Amino acid sequence: MNFLHCDHNEQYLTLHDCITTRAYLEDGKLGFEFSDGFWVSPDHPESNLSALVRTDFSKVEYTLKDGKDYDVSIYVFDVSVSGKITGAMWELQELLDNINSGKCKLEFIYQYTDFRSRMVECMLHTDEEPYHQTCIIKISAPEVSYYWNNLRADRPW
């Protein structure tokens, strides 16, 4: 799919509270698609709106440092009934399979960046217990690309 807009500057874009509907690793890029879009600030050069709004269908692609799955580390945490926190490391393919099969939805919460990597705090939502799990994804990617077509004035923050 071709998009009208592509931005590599994250200054005016956020994935906060956005849920991915498909994820992939293709051509050295880790991609996440959002049927309900992501957020664009009114300060973005492409926006003539006065509010933070969602885009229409969109995607985000992280250009991985070496283009391989080892550029991505995934940690998933569970909290037991007694309050004990346990964690497990997932393989990238496991996360992709769970998202694409509909077994879980990945909601982006916060993203921390430096010049070559990102740490993304997420929530995994499932229809079975534990229903919600915290997920931390460390992505070694010097570049990220945000793609979308239109801003949705009817979807302000």
Image (cartoon, rainbow, N blue to C red):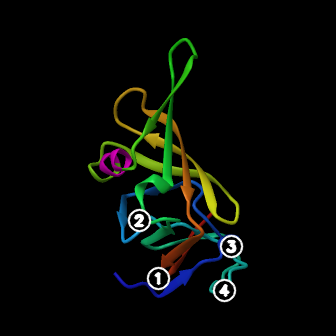
Going 58% across and 72% down the picture, which residue do you hit?
143
Q: Nearer the viewer, residue 72 or 125?
A: 72
Marks 4 and 3 in Cβ contact (< 8 Å): no
Within-10-Å neighbours for mark 3: few <14, some 14–19, many 20+: some
Within-10-Å neighbours for mark 2: few <14, some 14–19, many 20+: many
* Label 4 or label 3, whichever comes before in sequence order: 3
**Mark 3 to mark 1: distance in Å?**
16 Å
Going 70% across and 77% down the picture, which residue do you hit?
42
Which mark's residue is nearer the viewer, 4 or 1?
1
The spot of residue 135 in percent (x, y) is: 52, 41
**Element at label 3:** helix
> Is 97 one of the magenta-colored residues?
yes
Q: Quadrant of residue 112?
A: bottom right
> Is 54 one of the magenta-colored residues?
no
* Residue located beneath label 2 in the image: 33
**Main SS category, magenta section:** helix
* Label 2 or label 3, whichever comes before in sequence order: 3
Q: Residue furthest front?
A: 66
* Residue located beneath label 4 in the image: 48
* Residue located beneath label 1 in the image: 149
Going 57% across and 17% down the picture, which residue do you hit?
84
* Residue located beneath label 3 in the image: 12
